[in-house]
Image: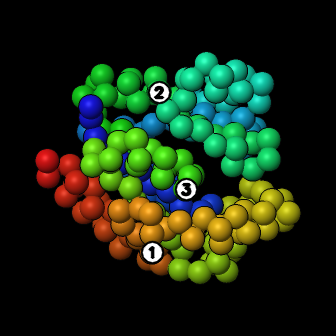
Amino acid sequence: MGKVIIFSAPSGAGKSTIVKYLLDKNPELEFSISATSRQPRGKEQHGKEYYFFTQDDFKKRIAAHEFLEWEEVYPGCFYGTLQQEVERIWAKGHTVLFDVDVKGGINIKQKFGKNALSIFIQAPSIECLRQRLIGRNTDSPEKIEERVNKAEYEMSFADRFDTIIVNDNLAEAQAEAEKKVRDFLTNA
């Protein structure tokens, strides 16, 4: 079994930005592409940012036990990690890097135990999260408030992760994440 690194956070905390930074600097890390039943946002492409499935197809894959973990994150909106994605990355000799929702991160950590490093990225405040989500300009005001309300709930799970990084300064958060990952990969 290979090692896995898990990043989770509420929407707008900066998790995906930190993950992209780590992937660009560390060729031994490979991004695990999650599956979702939601529609693509902006320029997202199937097989790059996510595997986009219809809700029916997603449910068929659940029934066929194709997921390492999955969650109905919002009503009718599923996210999950395909087992074949992890196997594909390990077959290359790479370390799997997950960018997943909070419950997915907890579930993956439970499955892999000491072979997993789980990192929770947190914004300095809920208001900061709200402003970041507004700045993205990808969601309606109603969807932003739904994400902010969910963020408050998700933050209550932060202590279930191996480490918490508060992203109030992106360069510092990136450096801290890189150090945590490096230490995990170099210690058996």
Element type where label 2 sits in the image? helix
Residue drawn at x 35%, y 73% is 172
Q: Amino acid at mark 3?
A: Val
In the displayed structure, does residue 147 sit left or right of residue 163? right
Spatial separation of the CA atoms under disc 3 and disc 1: 15 Å
Q: Residue 139: x, y in percent?
A: 78, 57
Query: Could you tell whether 120 is left or right of 39 in the image?
Result: left
Cβ–Cβ under 8 Å for marks 2 and 3: no
Q: Earlier in the sequence, mark 2 or mark 1?
A: 2
The secondary element bearing badge 3 is classed as helix
Identify whether 61 is placed above or below 32: above
From the top left corner, tell me how far across and down residue 156 is, in percent: 57, 71
Residue 150 rendering spot, x and y as whole percentages: 70, 64
What's the residue at 60%, 65% (across, down)?
Answer: 154
Cα distance, mark 2 to mark 1? 30 Å
Which residue is painted at 49% across and 47% down in the image? Answer: 107
Instruction: Say which residue label 1 marks.
Output: 166
Q: Earlier in the sequence, mark 2 or mark 3?
A: 2
Sequence order check: which comes first, mark 3 or mark 1? 3
Residue 31 quadrant: top left
> Residue 102's mark?
3
